[in-house]
Amino acid sequence: MRAALDCLLDPRSIAMIGASANAGRIGGMPLELLTRFGYAGGIYPVNPKYQEVFGIRCWPDIEAVPEPVDLAVLAIAAAEVTPMLRRCHAHGVRAAIVYAAGFAEAGGDGARLQAELEAFVAQSGMAVAGPNCMGFANLNTQAHTAFASVFKTAPAQSRPGMVSLLTQSGNVCAAVYAIARRLDLPFSHFINTGNEACLDFSQYLEYLAADVHTEIVLGYIEQLRDGERFVRACQELERQGKLLIALKAGSTDKGAAAVRSHTSALAGDKRVYAAAFRQLNVIEATDFAQMAQLASLATLRHRSAGKRVAVLTMSGALGAILADKFIGAGLELPDLPAGLQAVLRGGIPDYGMVGNPVDVTGNVVNDPAFVRTVLQALATTDAIDAVVVYAPGYMLDRMADALAEASRQHQRLFVAIDTGLAQSRAALREAEVAVFEDLGLAVSALAPYLLWCEARGTRRMVPIDTTVNLSPPCVPALPCNEVDARAYVAAFGLPQALARVARTAEDAVAQARHAGYPVALKILSADIAHKTEAGGVALGLADDAAVSAAFDRVLRAASAAQPDARVDGVMVQKMERGVAELIVGATRDPVFGPVLTVGLGGVLTEIYQDTSHRLLPVDEAIAMHMLQELKAYPLLDGYRGKPRADVGAACRAIVAVGKALLAAPARVAEIEVNPLLIKEAGQGVAVLDALILPATP
């Protein structure tokens, strides 16, 4: 397949089937681009209507083409595609691009045509892009197969490309390319995947991970079809020191369909994708302009950078605005060391700030030597990771020599924000200073990039092997009640709060006396997942009379809520005390496979939506990061003098839930512990409720 993809993405010869002499038609535009930009390979227009197009001989059919052809581009109707592919394959063509729409996206006959296409490709081994595809461009060889006028309107590229575009939308491909070329980003590949009937996004990403001409990938994703391959491709990008910047669109919340589970509702497509991107060191973008700016920053990723930023301005107001925006985006503006502040105060008037932000005031540009002193000091202090200079127009020009010198002498990232029309922009970029023309866009790009720099090399990648090397107990018949669910998860190291089953009110009283008051009663049923909503829970029962009354009340409520539910009695357990409650759930995502969710637990779970997600497996270090990502984490860390929680035990429990799903057969769709009670430090955790859900048939 690698050789076939080479024919698709780096062809030595191209046949255009359905060629046109009109550069405005899809069968003519690529031919006009190939000749305009000087593609050096063989070009073979195919159409019996013409003798010649764009000064090139036109052939009546593919069989008449006298030379071997790497790539056939099909500008023909959907119904003609697969028969033509068979002819191309018989003639030795290794790869093809299908422009035509009217396949699976059209339903009915279109779906039949796509099934026929897929069957042929599986049998032949051809690399076929599309259908419903704009085409490609290899900008290093000028192999243009896309009917995209943007190549004629965007600034021409004069140096070898190292950025590749990979999108599931042709219009997005063209839009991002146009914006990025205005930043002078040099492109290698321009790829629009179309319907992905035979080649999907992850396969192209694998190719680009190994491509020596690709260092940065800009990806637009609507839906991944092969999550495991995507993970492998991202891991290879990481190993090669490359970067994927991805914009994910079209996310939907799976929660509406997951009526029996909190975990699936909390995860949802968008959150799982975002978690996967973080784990895989992918920078997630939110719009096209930001994608282009992130790619521009990524060309400087050999420079040291991180989330601790020094802001240098000519205006206290702009310093305050930048500080607010950077801190709000997750960056830090640490106070500069006293010695460095003393150096700064040597040339900054008393009314100028020296702490961070640094307001050098407008007068400083009249003293180039002091500007150099300031920038050299910021370049060498260990207190920060990156320097951002806001200086409009002529002020930036006055500082430019010193800024360029500091950037050349030191590996620290320097950034300039110029909202004027500084003449020094090109010289600064030549010195590897990142230059922005808009304050908002600067913050939008710098924040995720600097956070990525901070995490680079420390973030734990996702292991491909998700097997668990132990002999777990048999999963109970599904659906199962809570007693059986507790027994299964206990085998992975999850401690259990003492719970007993009672089938009569008298039995419940006896069990409550044995446990010690106060106690809780819960309905025991494999058919009732959310006991609280069904009225199947009674808490804080302090004596025999309360237990007896609660037994009858719980059974009546459950019967009213779900009349057909099987009821096995009630569970009686002693009321537990702790610091906080969490939800810990593991589920099988349709794209990425096993996924873990941790969040604020109990009945408030879906209200606050305070969650963290990871692809499985996870270890205790990753579990700790998940807890620290929660807004509720201070509750576990002794908030306002409250007791600290046993976070170590919580991390072990989180890992155990993940292992429980990984060890379970595919018929188990989800395992959820909610709530998991986190007790005070040294006292461990308690499973207050557990749930195992079967896969949908």
Image (tube, helix red, strand yellow):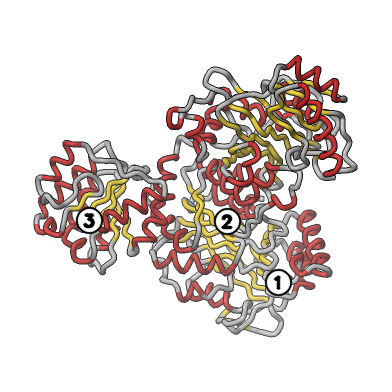
Please, what is the three-letter code of the amino acid marked with disc 1? Ala
- Viewer-proximal residue among 376 and 561: 561
Asked if one can make out residue 219 in the rendered structure from this viewpoint, the answer is: yes
In contact (CB < 8 Å): disc 2 and disc 3: no
Quadrant for residue 670, please give it: top right
Residue sitting farthest toward the front? 545
* Residue bearing mark 3: 316
In the displayed structure, 571 sits above or below 263; it is above
Counting residues from the N terminus, which is met first, the one under dot 2 or under dot 3?
2
Residue 515, how many percent across, how many down? 73, 17
Which one is in front, 545 or 218? 545
Disc assigned to residue 248: 2
**Disc 3 versus disc 1: nearer the observer:** 3
Q: How many marks?
A: 3
Cα distance in 3D space between marks 2 and 3: 37 Å
For the point 43% across and 28% down, which residue is it?
Answer: 641
Label 2 residue SS? strand
Left or right for 598, reference 257: left
Q: CA distance from mark 3 to mark 1?
A: 57 Å
Tell me where residue 570 appears, x and y as whole percent: 81, 28
Quadrant of residue 148 within the rendered picture: bottom right
Q: In the image, is residue 357 above or below residue 642?
A: below
Work out which quarter of the rendered image holds the C terminus and state it.
top right
Q: Is residue 480 visible?
A: no
Q: Which residue is mark 1?
A: 100
| Label whose residue precedes the other's in the sequence (2 or 1) | 1
* Residues marked 2 and 1 touching at CB (< 8 Å): no
Q: Position of residue 227 (x, y in %)?
A: 66, 46
Q: Nearer the viewer, residue 279 or 521?
A: 521
On the rendered structure, is 433 left or right of 164?
A: left
Label 3 crowding class (10 Å Cα cut-off): few <14, some 14-19, many 20+? some
